[in-house]
Image (cartoon, coloured by chain):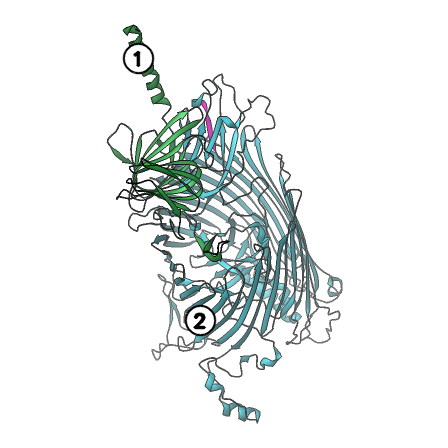
Amino acid sequence: MIYDGLMMKNKWLLLFGMVFCFTTISFAQPRFIYNPVFFARADQPIEISIRIDGNVSASDEMRIYFRTKGNESYDYIVSEKYGEEFRGSIPAQSASVGKIEYFFTFLYGGNIYTLPESNPYYEPFEIQITPVEPGNTITVRQPVSPLVAKKPRNSGNLLSLSTEKYLILSPENEERLMGEDVVIAVSLFFETGEIDIYKTKLLLDGRQVKPELSENLITYVPPHISEGRHEVDLNFIRSDGKEYEPVRRRFQVMSARRGGMVTLPFVSGASGNIYAESRSESYSGIRQNTNLTGGRLRGKTGFLHYGTRFYITSLENKNFQPRNRFLFWVEAKFFNLYGGDTSPRFSELILYGKRIRGFNVQLNLKLINFDFVMGQTYRSVKGISLNQLIIDPATQDTSYYNPATGDTVQNPISRYGTYDQNLLGLKVTFGRRRGSHLGFSAIKVKDDINSIQSGLKPKDNVVVGSDLQIAMFSNRFRWKTEGAFSILTDDISGGSLTKSNIDSLTGESIPFDPADFEKIIVLNTSTIPINPATFSSIAFTGTLQLRLLRNALTVKYKSIGAAYNSLGNPFIRKNIRGLFVNDRIRLFRNRVYLNLGYEKYKDNFSQDDGKPVLDLETHQLGINFFPGNGLPNLNLNYKTYQRNNGVAVFDNTSLNSVDERENNTTKELNINVNYDVRLFNLRHNLSVNYIKLDKTDALQGSRMMMPNFLPVAINNDIQSFSLQTRYQIPLRTTVSYSGNKNSFLGGLNLFEFSSIDARADYSMFQEKLNLYTGFRRFNASGGTQTNLPGAAYLGSLVIKYDKTQFNVGARLILKRKHQFIIDLTSIDFKDNGGYYDADNQFVVNPSFKDYMVRFRYELQF
Amino acid sequence: MRSPIKVILSVFVLAGLFSINGTTDTKDIAFLFKTNGKVEIQQNGSKLWHGAKRGFRLNSGDKIRTGDNSLAALLFTDDKSLMKIRSRSDVIVKGERKQASIAKSIFMQVGEVFISVKKQRSVFRLETPTGVAAVKGTEFYGQMDEDGKFTILGISGIVELINKYGSVLVKAGEKGISTGDKAPQSQKAAPGDGKTWGQEGDNNEPQYDELEIPFKDKDGNIRTLQLRTKVKGKK
């Protein structure tokens, strides 16, 4: 939390800050409502949903940053806004990934908030990727596994069924396929009288569907099928009415972006989709309308593969970084060309997935490969003057001017602008990109100082590096090492120093003129490192990955210098070195997966700033247990995380003293039970989660001796369960509950909430029409207190509100290509909370009646 | 001499049996597993062509034709034999159900097909105007061009290529050619043979990186080993 940082400040300032923050926060800071996801199944997208309490506007943007644990760089997705809720989907991960780290950034009213609030890049949330349950192993290859004939536990009344009597033609068991390729087909070899074909029941995901039946063949083509895992159950009935034991088959429908195409009438051999969406909503009394459109297309002509993606929103605003996105690409055997919003990857230390609006050209000449990128990483955004800021109510465009002169007012500046920032990069790789190779990379990133006027510290950055990868034995052995060196000039607004400048400053004659190198990099007093011989701007990593003897072992050592800076990958944690070890062990025929993790880092190891080294140590144990035989699956994870800088004494004799002592331990326990069960001839999925987090301060006792101390203790206690039921009729219901208790600052700040959700989905006309309705009841309570003597209420917040939400919607599919969605949501928001003002008077927050209407059309081709 | 009445009765009984067989044992011999582009069916006994999508059931005698950049993949219902019919092809599917198996006979007037028969339960023949390919558990490409040249490329197993002048066995890695004016011949397939056969329309085929490694065989001849690895989507 932000209070960790506040601990380090002057205590009086801290106290003032507390009061100020609480009163300010009550008006401005959004509150995240989030039940963390800790477990996710391999090979399935990870759905993330987070809510915001506050006046969320259409221009607010929530990003979810994520990376494989152990990696240096984050990718991100921009989540979609549904009223006060933001939804995003982290792409499916393979079981070998082990863990995903993620955090949120929320662009709100021109400011950026994060979750976790404190140290999000370095202490993010984690998701343990649980392997697919044995027997449910997904394979892309054509499976050769025998038919799955599931025998219910109580099969005494059922007739046994020989596999010679039927042949499931499609889908293959555990097959992955596109939604438009799904055909359920079963060939029959029954003798006359052995079966009453017209009583045969075919169930898709527990719902009976109407297949085409004949004595030889059963076929069914779902008019629409969602992405994800599905089950087919086939119940044969004998002529005398007796039932055979059922047959079950599982398969997985992949998203369209993973490949698979159907013919596009107007572009031969291409496929894709186009959609348009319009929303009208009112939240906290603020009405907003949003329109967006997007689409994607892939195709092939001759030897060329091509494609494009685009996303255009009415939220595009020149005062922010681009929200519209577009990309086109052409791929062939020897070259690839990407234009638009590209995300090139050279190496984790240098350039790795950063959005660049420009071109990326790859030449693949087998033994030597070239990767060239050129484009813009940030576009210019004007700064905002404080005194004459004008906001156009229609477009939200901002402008400023000096009415006295008619000129642009540059000072004082309310918000500094952003310069155009351009990147140029080249990577040469000897060997195969994905296999063993040696690569050399170089990038140059520079702000265009002429692009705006009210900017702050335009920068110039050059990074060079190399990477070596050795992969052997079908990638069971992989060694990768990367190294990079950076030079950053933090402020190039004054240009480069000249030889005479330096000579006069130092009194000595240097052997070169920095101005001669200005085109490569601007060198001046803000250049980091000033002395490259200190090696403080060097970063390197070494990673060993072994997959053998049921182990998936990763060992990584890294050392990132304090002065290392790559604007091609600004999220790299600097001034840290240490070891990361993780092993996943398969046991008992893959019924048990054991995850063991250890991390030991020295943060601030260079001590350039004079502050102590902070030791970070993490131990982790995870277990995935798949007992089979119809029993529930269990996932468990336990982690301890310790931060200790070894400072034992706090000298509080001066008002300016800062308590630098840090010695705290966080213990985190996550338990998840997931149970697929049949009860009352219905198929249910029950999921129960329990999360417990405790952060304790080893020095709390000594801190309590000081007046006005702020404890760092955090306690989180979260329980949730959900029950999803599929009925014989095409009805699916979901009931869920979650309770979340949070205590920060040793109890000074409390936040507690619970929600009950119920939802029903009903399909008609062979799933061409889907109707749904939902109900949600949300209660929150808590507040903040101050320990300011004599002002028990000043600045205190009281959180006490409830929301009742109704939602109805429909999805209509016509001719398998056209999809229409309409969605209506109504929220009754009653707020009895508020805050105490300077007169110790309690001010009640306003209540609202909110709504959202959403309409979407999508064409698939 | 048999009595005419008995003969007539026997004929009627046989005809009846035949008609029963004809209506029941030739139905649902296959179904369209996947379609891309323009795929049309002319059902046996009908003169009308109509479009067909996945899930469509095929009876014996049904004709299939495909347009440009099109593909029809069908599965036979007895043993999951797979046939992909490529662009600009014209094919008649015939089959007769015998207990749990279907004797299959495909007549291709022109076009290209890929056939995979892995668990063969019965006869599988690919017939063209200038030759017949009898399948014996295999995968192969078959191409019938408009000049009457029938070419097959063995992927695995053995195919017997027959015409009125003789026959030849075509093994994996070999190419068999039948032109209708002489006995069919087989030869080693050259690297790249069949590589581009009718790829258009079959967009779901996985993409591969290919590596070619030249080496000398025991006779000192330079040969090429082709390795293919599946490529994941990049963007």
Q: How crowded is mark 1: few (under 14 residues within 10 Å), some or many (20 or more)?
A: few
Q: Nearer the viewer, residue B33 or A391?
A: B33
Q: Which of A54 and A643 is in front in this view?
A: A643
The kind of residue on which mark 2 rests is Leu
Q: Quadrant of the N terminus of chain A?
A: bottom right
Q: Name the residue under label 2.
A: A423
Question: Position of B164 compared to A836: left or right?
Answer: left
Q: Which of A603 and B218 is in front in this view?
A: B218
Report x, y in % for residue B144: 31, 42
Can you tell which chain is drawn green?
Answer: B
Report x, y in % for residue A661: 71, 68
> Mark 2 touching mark 1, by CB under 8 A?
no
Q: Is mark 2 on a helix, strand or loop?
A: strand
Label 2 chain ID: A
Question: Position of A570 compared to B93: left or right?
Answer: right
The colour of chain A is cyan
Report x, y in % for residue A234: 49, 29
Q: How crowded is mark 2: few (under 14 residues within 10 Å), some or many (20 or more)?
A: many
Q: What element carries label 1?
A: helix
Q: Are marks 2 and 1 on the same chain?
A: no
The kind of residue on which mark 1 rests is Phe
Q: What stretch is highlighted in magenta?
A: A199-206
Q: In this view, does B151 lie above or below A838?
A: above
Q: Mark 1 points at which residue?
A: B12
